Image (cartoon, rainbow, N blue to C red):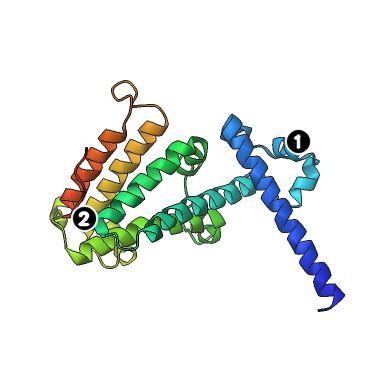
Amino acid sequence: MSRRVLKVDSRDRRRAATLAEIKAAARRLLVSGGSAGVGLRAVARELGLTPPALYRYFPSHEALIGALIADLYDELTTALMDLQCADEDADLGARLYLLANGLRDWALAHPAEFGLLFGTAVPEPDGDGHEETPGHQAAMRFGALFKELVAQIWHQKPFPHPADDELGTVLVEQLTAESEHFHGMPPGAIYLSLNYWTRLYGLICMEVFGQLHWVLPDAAAYFEAQLFEIGQALGLDCPEPE
């Protein structure tokens, strides 16, 4: 191997290490002060760098936040995939519980990170390169876990769902456009899946941000009851709440 190649490899490794340090510092600031505290100047101070030096790695605040979002989505996705891999014999009902509870556990353990991910709009592909951003790609990988699972549930045992004429033309057109991402599920089945997703996601958000304490000191049992209801509606064999 030539000296030139060794020099390039060494430079690439140093750059990758610095990028990792910058994102780690940004995450620490996120946890300690919320998203408002993750400024380029604050990150530079954290690392003992000058702001201009930081611009060599991230040209803007948006670029830094986007890279952090991508890393966090991939961390969450990997954690959920590891849960599934740990129990290869799990049926579809058990997998639903693993993914849903895994998401809740991660959110409660990382409230600041969860707030950044799910409180920040994911750019929609619009032909201007948004579909190529790391944050969008990572968000789609996360969403694919749940899309794949619900599609498997549907194809194994189709569950009852609203007819197209119950949903309206505009909604049916939008859901039909998404059908290929749900492996050919009909609009009504995608509609119900979206209902169940927003139900669980909304419940996790309310718990993470302290909006259930007024009636539920511990929302775990309520989450399990909601998950059981959803599992039954999907025709899954799910454990009853304790």
Of all residues, the one furthest to the bottom in this rendering is 1
Of all residues, the one furthest to the top in this rendering is 214
Of all residues, the one furthest to the right in this rendering is 3
Determine which residue is flagged by label 1: 45
Q: Nearer the viewer, mark 1 or mark 2?
A: 1
Q: How crowded is the residue under tag 1: few (<14 C-alpha within 10 Å), some, or many (20+)?
A: few
Q: Earlier in the sequence, mark 1 or mark 2?
A: 1
Distance from disc 1 to disc 2, alpha carbons, whole Å, reads 54 Å
Side of 104 where 159 appears, left or right: left
Q: Secondary structure at mark 1?
A: helix
Q: Is residue 173 visible to the viewer in this orientation of the structure?
A: no
Q: Is residue 166 visible to the viewer in this orientation of the structure?
A: yes
Image vertical order of residue 27 relative to residue 14, above or below: above
Residue 140's label in the rendered image is none
Side of 33 where 177 appears, left or right: left
Find residue 34 and report its horizontal and vertical position in percent: 56, 32
Side of 176 where 205 appears, left or right: right
The foreground one among 28 and 169 is: 28
Find residue 207 and report its horizontal and vertical position in percent: 37, 32
The foreground one among 201 and 177 is: 201
Q: Label 2 is placed on what type of residue?
A: Thr
The foreground one among 188 and 225 is: 225
Find residue 126 and report its horizontal and vertical position in percent: 48, 58
Q: How crowded is the residue under tag 2: few (<14 C-alpha within 10 Å), some, or many (20+)?
A: few
Q: For the N terminus, which image quadrant?
A: bottom right
Q: Label 1 is placed on what type of residue?
A: Arg
The foreground one among 141 and 238 is: 238
Q: Check contact, mark 1 vs mark 2: CB within 8 A.
A: no
Q: Residue at the location (38% across, 36% down)?
A: 205
Residue 169's label in the rendered image is 2
Find residue 184 and report its horizontal and vertical position in percent: 26, 67
Q: Residue at the location (33% across, 28% down)?
A: 218
